[in-house]
Amino acid sequence: MRVYYLLFALVFLFLLPLPGSGGIINILQKYYCKIRGGRCALFGCLPWETSSGRCSQSGRKCCLRRK
């Protein structure tokens, strides 16, 4: 039974992000942007797009087309 506790602790530590990097948070933000029909822009959105959040902690923007 103690082995299960150890395995749970190791999995939990594996999923924690390192200081300075988003880890699993970046993946979820990028996925959420794609679901909404956006794209992740490295520098900025194009003139016919509007910024609707971030895709990562490093500054990528989620861009959606204006309606």
Image (cartoon, rainbow, N blue to C red):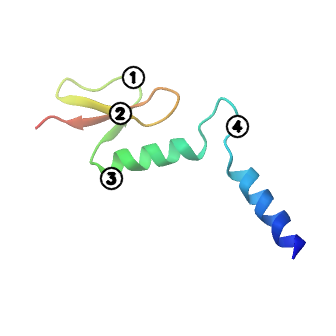
Mark 4 neighbour class, 10 Å CA radius: few under 14, some 14 to 19, many 20 or more:
few
For marks 4 and 1 on the same chain, the one whose residue lies earlier in the sequence: 4
Residue beneath label 2, please?
53
| Of the pair 52 and 63, the residue shown nearer to us | 52
CA gap, disc 4 and disc 1: 24 Å
Q: Nearer the viewer, residue 60 or 20?
A: 20
The residue singled out by tag 1 in the image is: 43
Question: The disc labelled 4 sits on which kind of residue?
Answer: Leu
Which three-letter amino acid code belongs to the residue tagged 3? Ile
- The image shows a total of numbered marks equal to 4
The residue that mark 4 highlights is: 18
Query: What residue is disc 3 on?
Result: 35
Q: Within 10 Å of the Cα at label 3, are there few (<14), some (14-19), or many (20+) other Cα atoms?
A: few
Crowding at dot 1, Cα within 10 Å, few <14 / some 14-19 / many 20+, comes out as few
Q: Nearer the viewer, mark 4 or mark 1?
A: 4
Assign the N terminus to one quadrant of the image.
bottom right
